Image (cartoon, coloured by chain):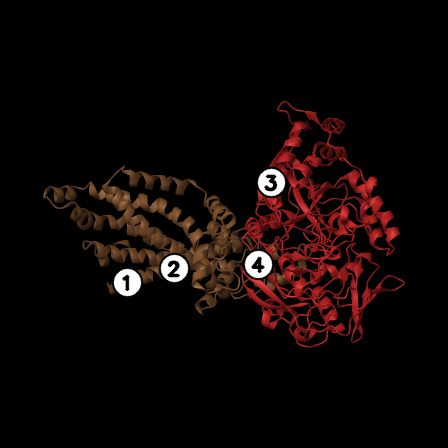
Chain colours: A red, B brown
Amino acid sequence: MLIMVLIGTLLSACGGSNTATNPPKEEPTPSENTSQTEPAKENTTKTPKDGGTLTMGTFSDIVTVNPVFQSDTSSGDVSKLILAQLYNLDREANVVAEPWSLAAEPPQISEDGKTYTVKLKPEAKWTDGTPVTADDIIFTINATRNPEVGSPGISAYDKVDSIEKVDEHTAKIQLKQVYAPFIYSLILTLAPSHILKDVPPKELKQHAYGTDPAKTVTNGPWKWSEWKQKQHISVDADPNYWGAKKPHIAKVIYKIYADQNTEVQALIKGDVDTVSAIPVTQLAAVEKRDNLRVVLAPGPSYEYLGFNFDPKNFPDNFSLFEGQKTRQAIAHALNRLGMVDNVLKGTGKLMNAPFLPGSWADPGEAAVNYNYDAEKAKQLLAEDGWTLGSDGILTKDGKRFSFELQYNAGNSRREQISSIVQQNLKDVGIEVKTKGIDFAAWVDQHLNTGKYQAILMAWSLTDPDPNGESTFSSKYYPPAGQNSGWYKNEKLDELWVKGYSVVEQSERKKIYEEVGKEISTDLPYIFMYQYGTPQGIGPRVNFAEEDKPEPSLAYGYMYRMINWWVE
Amino acid sequence: MTEYLIRRILQSVLVLFLVSIITFVLIHAAPGGPTQVFLSPGLSQEAAQIQAKNLGLDQPIPVQYMRWMGSLLQGDLGHTFKNNLPVGEILWPTMQNTLILMSVAWLFSLLIAIPWGIYNSTVEYGLSDQTASFISYLGFAMPTFWFGILLQELFALELDLLPLSDMYTMGKEGQIGDLFMHLILPVTVLTLGFLASYVKFSRSSMLEVLNQDYIRTARSKGMKEKRVIYRHALRNAMIPIVTILGSDLAILVSGAAITENVFNWPGMGRLFVEMALAREYSVLMAITLITAVIVIIGNLLADILYALIDPRVQLARKGGASA
């Protein structure tokens, strides 16, 4: 199901671990209140022009566009240009069949909620002229869920029982159980069965499909013409594209920069037309240029301070975070609003439960909000049995309240946040030692094994579904699961299952409201804030109001790019 | 001479072999493997193990080393883990890019630094010498990335005279004129860095020689100052300079990560950092070995140059003694 995925914001890719591409759900209210495009250009009145080149900036090279293996953001960006998705998300994150989707109509879900029928557009074709068929759907999903293949997307299809071909253009997917979030697993790009079906599963990863432009047939508006490694990727509008709606932009260059700063400089110079993530430190430099637009809004990710509940991680097996009041005290001690204002600079929003603010599952007021109140924190800590030691640090049963807070080194946002946490907690008598660790080592030695005291981390909600079982349920302990803090709450364990076992949204909403109340009281994490990455857009880029970027969606910086044009 | 060369080459092979073992072990000892970097945390343990097996990462390190060495001896540098690209396909173009940038900067700075250092040694603490000192301090003290960004701000963004970054303008790949424009800023940054040490170094090795007795003897014989400097002093002063140049030769291929980053030059320094973060063992091994080869060649060249500069140096005996 892979709803959440960890983000290692590093120089290299995003640590390379995002799968699927699907964003959080927005209330069906217009999203203007969350995204401000500035300055508002009157580009709605202009008529689209065909031709021209758009250059997108990025700071990491692609890995592969083979849908079975694609997992990093850069490869995802390029995939979106050259491969049509089976379904797309609309601005409110509903699963829809757009003119550029491969599917002809929304998926049909059976009465019992276990069968999904998908119908393809008969005109959809690969660049070699072969039609896109039900075989492609079957091949892609089966290859992804086959453990021998080693696909990073394997968990998205672990509830699938079987897939059958109804006719050339229709596939029927049978689930083992009712699993509401599955619908978002249908937002996928397809691998060509006619090219890959005879490749043994173990050798699929070695196949040149996805890395060699000449051997990669595609089915999207643009086709892949060049990959100059570590430098750029170029795609050209496909003259034989099957879609009724054709792309306006003749050529898209995906240009790779050494890091985000270099990328932003290039935006200012005019070497690139869009940059999907401006570091907050560079925001002012971009904003002061009149010809550049900045899309500033919180995105589909949230940051948290995660506690570890396994006593083995603490000296003398004394778990510091055992007491619920202790965790609530920490929540009160942190100046989260200050972090949002001073570190995130307009790209963040407070949150109190693992549901994005404004999404349909957002429990709103039902979740407990912990305001910044050091006195209250001290009081709660005292109630939980902590007393102030002579060195200004709290103690209980002779144990000092001192812990190590880990994050990935090189992530400047977490560096700043961790030192604020350190300062805030020092004010209430808790000693924090911050420690930045190289991303690969961190994942290997601490996250996958669940060996740490506390972490500063983020989840990217790659999927608009609110289901969070794999992160919080005691079924998902390390090393296999993502509940790396060994959190156990039986009530929540049950609620998560209840939440995905009904398909009706209004019923699910009630369940997630309960989840929100329970999780914000019990606090396996301190939920800090939703955050986003500001997008920068140069003067040559034009789009109609209905085609503007949608920061609340994953890959929202290229939302409906097929309708954009350059002048 | 031939015997000496053969002995040196045999020694070098042994050194390379040791370097390869040490690096291989060190790289594999780094925490977190390639699978942690590119596999999703959602992947089950079994799937992760199958994947590691497919890539041969489940084997003991000596076995992995033997496999790697086996293919290397057949001229195969291996493939990347994450997308199975041949290492050579990534490495050779990148190395060319670095070679272009670094050799221009290096030659340029040598052409300035050596004559300037020599001149400064003759007019100690003169205006020229003071200027050189100032530039050296600047070169040592100023962070490369900062100097690079300053130049970009001024010449690329404000004045709009030069390209901001990259090696070529899109669509002008391979054009010398375009390459030249793109070289100006990064070469300036690198040259400042090189100058800082080379000017100081050539000046001080000259000064050391100029204080020797035989120079005093030469002068007291009434020899012309020019002849003293160029005939007697320079030759001897060149020996330490050649040593430094020989051991610096490797930077021509290993690149300068920070400058490459700032100017988005698709070079080796950047590649190495990126590949280290991604734990791409085969690429890292290839870069390390190539660098080691160049270091060895650089030292060998320096040794040969000693003999040319200073007839007293006899290669054969020198080589024998160090063996």
Q: Which of marks 4 and 3 is nearer the N terminus?
A: 4
Q: Which of A242 and A520 is in front in this view?
A: A242
Whether residue A229 can be seen here: yes
Looking at the figure, which quarter contains the C terminus of chain A?
A: bottom right
Q: Mark 2 lies on which chain?
A: B
- The answer to which of marks 2 and 1 sits earlier in the sequence is 1
On residue B293, the disc is 2
The residue at 56%/65% (across/down) is A227
Q: Position of residue A212 (x, y in %)?
A: 58, 69
CA–CA distance between discs 2 and 1?
15 Å
> B180 or A331: which is nearer to us?
B180
Residue corresponding to mark 1: B5
- Using the image, name the chain to which the residue with label 3 belongs: A
* Disc 4 with disc 3 on a shared chain: yes
Check the residue under mark 4 and report the chain it is in.
A
Q: Name the residue under label 4.
A: A255
- Along the horizontal axis of the image, is B206 left or right of A31? left
Badge 1: residue crowd in 10 Å (few <14, some 14–19, many ≥20): some
Q: Quadrant of residue A233?
A: bottom right
- CB-based contact (under 8 Å), mark 1 and mark 4: no
Q: Which amino acid does label 4 sit on?
A: Lys
